[in-house]
Amino acid sequence: MVYMCFLVDQTRKVRRSKPAAGTCSRCGGGARVAEMKTATRFCYVPFYWKSWKAIICTYCGAILKSYR
Ligand SMILES: [Zn+2]
C-alpha cells in the first residue's frame, strides 16, 4: 500500500513579546508587541519560514495588528 501525503499546514509561534499600549477589541485583554514566526510545513516537514511582527492579545491570542 502506498501512502500519499499532501498535507500542507502552517504553525505560528511567538518568539518574543513585550507589553504594548492598548487593549483587545474582542475581549479587553492586554496587548503585546510580538515577534512572530510562521513555518509552512509539508508532511510535517518545515520548508519555509517567515518572521513578522504583530500586536497580539495576551488573553485570547487575537492578532490586533500586523506589520509586514
Ligand atoms: Zn483578546
Image (spheres, rainbow, N blue to C red):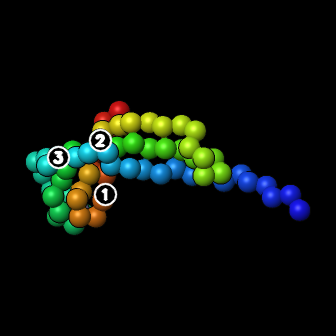
| 47 displayed left or right of 53 | right
| 15 displayed left or right of 8 | left
Residue 9: give x, y in percent of width and height: 57, 52
* Name of the residue lying farthest toward the left: 21
Pointer 2 residue = 35
Tag 1 or tag 3, which sits nearer the N-term?
3
Label 2 CB, ligand 1: below 8 Å? no
Q: Quadrant of residue 54?
A: top left
* Name of the residue lying farthest toward the bottom: 27
Q: Amino acid at mark 1?
A: Ala
Q: Quadrant of the C terminus?
A: top left
Q: Amino acid at mark 2?
A: Glu
Using the image, determine if residue 29 lies above or below residue 6: below
Q: Residues within 10 Å of mark 1 (few under 14, many from 20)?
A: some
Q: Residue at x 22, y 59 (%)?
A: 58
Cα separation, mark 1 vs mark 2, equals 14 Å
Circle 3/circle 2 CB separation < 8 Å = no
Q: Secondary structure at mark 1?
A: loop
Pointer 1 residue = 62
Residue 16: give x, y in percent of width and height: 26, 45
Pointer 3 residue = 18
Q: Secondary structure at mark 3?
A: strand
